[in-house]
Image (tube, rainbow, N blue to C red):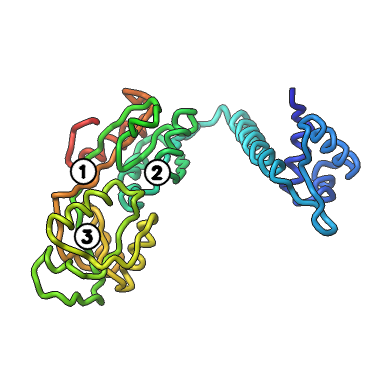
Amino acid sequence: MLNFKHLHYFWVVGQQGGVTKASESLHVTPQTISGQINQLEAELGRDLFEKAGRGLQLTEFGKLVMSYAEEIFTLGNELEAQVAHADEEQPILLRVGVADAVPKTIASRILMPAMDLNERIRFICKESTQENLLADLALHRLDCVLADGPIPSNLGVRGYNHRLGDSGLSFMAATSLTLASSRPFPQMLHEAPMLLTSDVSQIRAPLMTWFTDQQIVPRILGEFDDRALMKAFGQEGVGVFIVPTSIADEVAEQYDAREIGRITDVTESFYLITSERNPTNPAVVTIIEEARRWLGTTRAG
């Protein structure tokens, strides 16, 4: 079995940035720490450090071990803190994964009602791809995942899709951007400068199909995984950008933009994915109920 004392010394060296500072923190000699790390390397059968000039740096294997040590001892510190305050009223912990394709304004609007509960809420929000977040959900590292689509059938992840609702799409342009075409919407979009989401987003493919059906060929100047970055470019007048109609007014005010048209032929859907069919966490229940009220649906996917 792995000797956690050796691992702890190794972790402290990483936290303090060197053996000397770690020895001061642990109140032991540098030789003691070096000996503990040598024993850990012997246990693991691989080097954790390599020479770099006059000092040492982590090997690739050492970086891997450090990432696990970081998680182990961070959780241990959190456990100690929880035990020390066990008699105090503890906040409800809500670990939420937000898929990077979900607009952050949408995410904050959906999650915010949980903060209005009488109970104290502590959010831990993680942003990544839907696939990575669903893996964390399966390992019970997350309570729920906010995504722009249900669980993909090819992932083989067990979970439950709670459909929150849908939103049409609004085409936005900075007030400083003048479009060359005088034709009405949507024909004005033909050859117009356009900023689009990348294919990370569930709406990209149906949107391109809609352009084809409308015989519109936009002049695509940028494709973005990060919608906040896309809106920032749009604010500078680089091109027309697209947002869910549900937040068009907020975006117009925040980014000094105007809505030039909206469509309902292509819609963006939002889901809260949980490992429970019927969630019991009051924060999760509130999020689902309030999001459906806001987005105008009572259906579950």
Which quadrant of the view contains residue 256? bottom left
Label 2 residue SS = strand
Q: Determine contact: label 1, label 3, CB under 8 Å.
A: no
Give the residue type at disc 2: Val
Q: Position of residue 101 (x, y in %)?
A: 35, 48
Q: Position of residue 9 (x, y in %)?
A: 78, 38
Give the residue type at disc 3: Asp
Q: State which tag comes first along the sequence, 2 or 1.
A: 2
Report, in whole angstroms, how far the alpha carbon at label 1 lies from the one at label 3.
17 Å
Label 3 residue SS = helix
Q: Quadrant of the C terminus?
A: top left
Report the front residue among 295 and 139.
139
When the figure is inspected, residue 114 is found, relative to residue 247, above or below; the finding is: above
Residue with the mark numbered 1? 166
Q: Residues within 10 Å of mark 1 (few under 14, many from 20)?
A: many
Q: Kindly identify the residue that appears in the image at 39 percent across and 44 percent down.
A: 99
Label 1 residue SS = strand
Q: Position of residue 247 (x, y in %)?
A: 24, 54
Q: State which tag comes first along the sequence, 2 or 3.
A: 2
Residue with the mark numbered 3? 249
Residue with the mark numbered 2? 98
Q: State which tag comes first along the sequence, 1 or 3.
A: 1
Q: Determine contact: label 2, label 1, CB under 8 Å.
A: no
Report the front residue among 58 and 75.
58
Q: Position of residue 150 (x, y in %)?
A: 30, 35
Report, in whole angstroms, how far the alpha carbon at label 2 lies from the one at label 3.
23 Å
Q: Which residue is at the far left?
A: 184
Q: Kindly identify the residue that appears in the image at 32 percent across and 68 percent down.
A: 221
Report the front residue among 185 and 293.
185
Report, in whole angstroms, how far the alpha carbon at label 2 lies from the one at label 1.
17 Å
Q: Determine contact: label 2, label 3, CB under 8 Å.
A: no
